[in-house]
Amino acid sequence: MLKKLYQPPLALLTDLYQLTMAYGYWKLGRANQQAVFHLFFRKPPFHGGYAIAAGLQQAVEYLEGYRLDDSDIRYLAELTGNDGEPLFEQAFLDDLRDLKLNIDVDAMPEGTVVFGQEPILRVKGPILQCQLLETPLLNMINFQTLIATKASRIRAAAGDDPVLEFGLRRAQGIDGAISASRAAYVGGCAATSNVLAGKLFGIPVKGTHAHSWVMSFDSELESFERYAEVMPNNCVFLVDTYDTLEGVRQACQVGKTLRQRGHEMVGIRLDSGDLAYLSIEARNILDEEGFPNAAIVASNDLDEHIMENLKSQGAQIAVWGVGTKLVTAFDQPALGGVYKLAAMQREDGSWEPKVKLSEQAIKTSIPGMLQVRRYQTEQGLIGDMIYDEVRGIDPRHVIVDSKDTTRRKRLSENAQSHDLLTPVMRGGAPVGGDEPLEIIRARAIEQLQLLHPTIRRFMNPHEYPVGLDIGLHELRDRMIHDIRGPKLEG
């Protein structure tokens, strides 16, 4: 099954309704009409104040290799409608077999701090092609952005202590594990236990032994001694199999022997119990026994909230191993990103903005060919403007909150600013090349430091100023009014 599942091509990694809409465009002769779609989320995850964009590299790789092979076409030809007749005409399927993407993609670089309503990705090209890409792009960007954001919060709780991603065994399947390890590194984790992710992405890998190693010997002491013999340069002893503090003492005993052989015990790991109390007591034992540099590693269903609490109790934990609650985004299982049509090209070549309405203001989309301009001073980031590239920026330089139009902010023309969406594909071909993962990770860490601490806090964060260019806001208002029309009172 694995060879069938992960063997390219992966063009059928989509929802059926994308294909039925593509067929409709084809049938009506509209397949090549130019359109613009944006991928964005409405609210930052985890009740937080920001997200970290991730998953772009995988998305570009997917787009670069996009194709349907003969087996895909045969499968689609077998699909039937409610009347038992073929769902798609063979001529449409033949066109799909010959399809080569001819799209332009602009995106925020991975590791960019991003906020609600801001396009992470902009796709422009024939509407049939753009439509087919909705589901796979959401699949790749949503998940990795979610996990990178969770990792950044966990890293913030750890302060200067390294965080190790230990989630492979609890991840949501093979791809969930691989993607989560990559995204966790983008978000600030220092290493992973996932060896395949280490090989694929160059992420440092860490790990020593489990409880089964200790239990396989007649005594805990013997298990530590044997491990020190076979892995003298990788000795972090798991001490809580039987009696945690006694385990620490036995680790120190083996550590002294190890030192006589020219090696040093790296530390001990706690995986259960009262981590605050046990880490404090373990630190005392390690120091008294002559191991002040031995690190205390802690695991056991940690997340940013538990870690913050442990820190407040004075826990003596130097390295944090975080698994389940990181790679499964335990407290929010999905980002909620969406992919919306925002503009279509008229016959004369001009662009017609499109808006989707909703009874909920937050779900009313933003029309136009959107770009995000970020403003900052020496003190940090001060606000983001979402504007329409076709219309340009209104000279008033005012942003309007799309959720509450009474909230407005003037952005100084003298402040430093730059546009966040940059070209990654032109005419279906990648441009710019892949960024090293280390650069992406460094960008995420650096950009978070530019945010005010109140925006980064876990509970009730301050809202970063993001708004529509006032000219775009006024256009959107007119479009909404024209669609809804006047309503009768009473």
Image (spheres, rainbow, N blue to C red):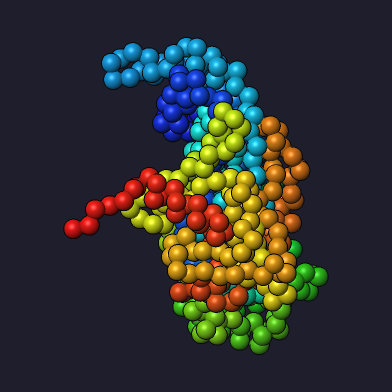
Q: Quadrant of the C terminus?
A: bottom left
| Residue extending furthest toward the left | 490
x 46%, y 74%: residue? 459
Q: Position of residue 460 (x, y in %)?
A: 45, 74
Residue 267's quadrant in the figure? bottom right
Residue 175 image point, x, y percent:
54, 43
Q: Is residue 475 above or below residue 287?
A: above
Res. 475 in view: yes
**Is residue 153 something that shows in the picture?**
no
The residue located at (73%, 66%) in the rendering is 416
Position above or below: 336 against 276 = above
Viewer-closest of 30 and 59: 30
Q: Classify 56 as above or below 184.
A: above
Horizontal side of 11 relative to 225 (left or right) equals left
Q: Compare residues 346 and 172 and report the one nearer the observer.
A: 346
Q: Residue 164: image x %, image y %?
A: 61, 63
Q: Where does the image place residue 292, in percent across and percent down from the top left?
A: 70, 82
Seen from the viewer's position, the closer of residues 48 and 293 is 48
Position of 338 compared to 465: left or right?
left
Count of numbered tags: 0
Q: Is residue 96 above or below residue 474?
A: above
Q: Residue at x 55, y 32 (%)?
A: 346
Left or right, 354 with respect to 449, comes to: left
- At x 52% / y 69%, what residue is drawn? 408
Question: Can you name the residue that lies furthest to the right here?
Answer: 262
